Amino acid sequence: MNYKTLVVAPILLAGMMFGVTTYAASPAVKEMAGILSHLNHYPSDSEKRSLGNIVKDTNANRAERVIAEAMMQMRHHVNAADRERLEAISRDQGVDKDTRQLAGILASIVHHPSQGDVAALDDMMK
């Protein structure tokens, strides 16, 4: 047996058994977290263009596209229909943690994110 088999394989197996995984937010989530972290009432025109690109991106998943579209349309807060979709995403265990958290933050924003929300958004951007 070589070094990789003796050392790396048991670590990977333990990670799979106990649900320990390394995870980085998708590029779309990182982009939206960056926009949302300094949002003040609504996204700028250039941020809306970035969000529009996410909506059209075939690599972005459905939840990411819904979040981007809701963010594009917001004025001080998201509309009621978007809030319902965002809240559904935030509860969907089939969606990754960062995307769920991003949806929940956006659903609750009035004018700008809270300090706690900004800290969570900063973590998503890492």
Image (cartoon, grey):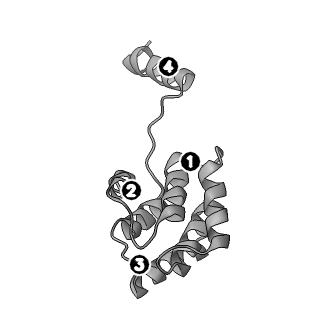
Q: Label 3 vs label 2: CA separation? A: 15 Å
Considering every residue shown, the one lying at the far bottom of the view is 45
Mark 1 or mark 3, earlier in chain: 3
Q: CA distance from mark 2 to mark 4?
A: 32 Å
Q: Which residue is mark 2?
A: 117
Amino acid type at circle 2 is: Asp
Q: Are marks 3 and 2 in contact (CB under 8 Å)?
A: no
Q: Which residue is mark 3?
A: 41
* Residue 98 position within the rendered picture, expressed as x and y whole percent measured from the top left: 49, 51
Give the Cα distance between marks 4 and 1.
Answer: 21 Å
Q: Quadrant of residue 27?
A: bottom left
What amino acid type should be assigned to the residue bearing mark 4? Answer: Ala
In the rendering, at what x and y percent does residue 32 appear? 45, 66
Q: Quadrant of residue 70?
A: bottom right
59 to 7, vertically: above or below: below
Tell me the residue that label 4 is attached to: 14
Q: Is residue 44 left or right of residue 73?
A: left
Mark 1 touches mark 3? (CB < 8 Å): no
Measured from the top left, where is residue 23 in percent x and y? Answer: 45, 43
Q: Nearer the viewer, residue 105 or 60?
A: 105
Q: Amino acid at mark 1?
A: Asp
Say which mark, if any, is on residue 96. Answer: 1
